Image (tube, helix red, strand yellow):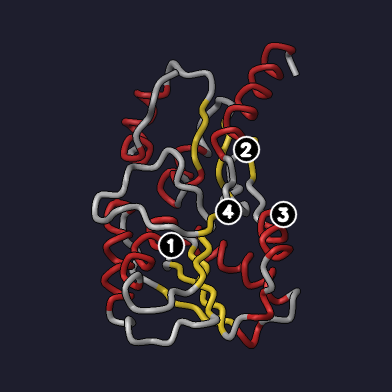
Amino acid sequence: PQIIGYHELCDPEIAWQRLKNFNGLIVHDSFVDERTSKVFSQLDIPIVRVGQSLPKYSNFSSSEVVQFFDPALNEFARYCDLKSYRRIIIVHTSHWNSIRLVREIRHFLHNRQLDDLLETIQLAKVSWDTAELCAFSYFQQLRDVDWSDTLIISVSGYFARGLCRALADSGELPDILSIDNLDGYERCTFFEEPFLSAIDRRMGNVYRDAAKLIYEQIQSGD
């Protein structure tokens, strides 16, 4: 196995040079955008995409490992009375993957007739290493807000940690649900690890099982 950088997939000449001796590629969906999909569409090797919640770029042939959030959200709803909240806030960015997650969460809440409780907060589209500080700075300005009977759903574990830290000393914390498990992420660089509820997608296990199945299919000639 070799690791390919995102920047190498943006330049066709570099990509051809790096990939010319490869016979397969596993790519995380966050690497797939308008620039890299042009390269992927011209590759003549098997491509497996992992980590996407909904397909977006389908102009090249690839196998897909799709993550579904509905089972985890349903499980959360079974032990948490969502109708007991006064407001439910989704915290997200303008990144297309974040927008897709918001769409899924909105659909989930709509099916439970919770549209009237729903609000959204869109933070700046920043890199992972500054996302936590971005959320901290934003929610520091909201320390005087009444957070009682409030559920905050964050589509980023980094945002969840930042906002939790910002509101930790403001009195009653809102309930915070992070649609993100932080296993394998870089450790927090700004603050101590705060407590929050999290939906653990166990994506490490999903990726390992998917890779094993792919290998078995290749070996069997399927």
Residue plotted at (74% across, 12% down) = 220
Earlier-in-chain disc, 4 versus 3: 3
Mark with earlier residue (4, 1): 1
- Residue to which mark 3 is pinned: 71
Distance in Å between CA atoms under marks 2 and 3: 28 Å
Going by the numbered disc 4, the residue's amino acid type is Ile
State which quarter of the image contains the C terminus: top right
User: Judging from the image, what secondary structure is the residue with disc 3 in?
Assistant: helix
Residue at image x 31%, y 73%?
169
Per the image, label 2 sits on a secondary structure element best described as: loop
Badge 4: few (under 14), some or many (20 or more) residues near its Cα, within 10 Å?
A: some
Which residue is under mark 4?
199
Which sits in the foreground, 23 or 69?
69
Mark 1 lies on residue? 95
Residue where numbered disc 2 is placed? 61
Give the percent coordinates (x, y) of residue 206. Answer: 61, 35
Which quarter shows the N terminus? top left
Q: How far apart in space, not on screen, are marks 2 and 1 (Cα)?
A: 24 Å
Q: Nearer the viewer, residue 121 or 24?
A: 121
